[in-house]
Image: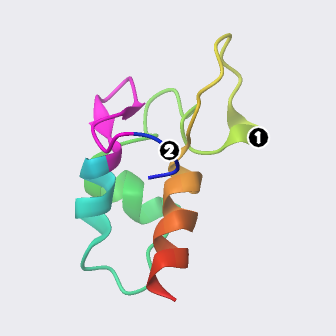
Amino acid sequence: MLGFDNSYEVCNCKNISIEQIIVALKEKEKPTLRDIQDLTTAGTECRHCIFQEGDNGKLKKKIYCKDILNEIKKERV
């Protein structure tokens, strides 16, 4: 997804991979960022992995939960 292996860790605080997010959202008709947080706990600690605008960490993430969500929505259209 988006040039990353599905095992790529999106949320380092909770060790959540792209694949775990994809699997968690599989049954959701209209998935949201909140669903990602509720179902995987990604983005619930430091919150830097949710979206680029909220990444205040010294090292910026390469992919965010929002990117994955947007890609999933695109694939479902």
Check disc 2 and report the residue beneath it.
Answer: 3
Which residue shows up at 35% across the image and 46% down it? 18
Q: Is residue 24 left or right of residue 13?
A: left
Q: Earlier in the sequence, mark 1 or mark 2?
A: 2
Q: Is residue 43 above or below residue 37?
A: above
User: Where residue 65 sits in the image (x, y, percent)?
Assistant: 51, 49
Identify the residue position indicated by label 1 in the image. Answer: 53
As helix, strand or loop, the secondary structure at mark 2 comes to loop
Give the camera-side residue of 4 and 52: 4
* Of residues 30 and 44, the one drawn nearer to the viewer in this rendering: 30
Residue at horizontal 46%, vertical 61%? 34
Task: Identify the residue shown where x is 46% and y is 40%.
Answer: 43
Q: Residues within 10 Å of mark 1 (few under 14, many from 20)?
A: few
Q: What percent of the width, then of the height, locates residue 11?
A: 41, 32
> Front-most of 61 and 30?
61
Helix, strand or loop for disc 1: helix
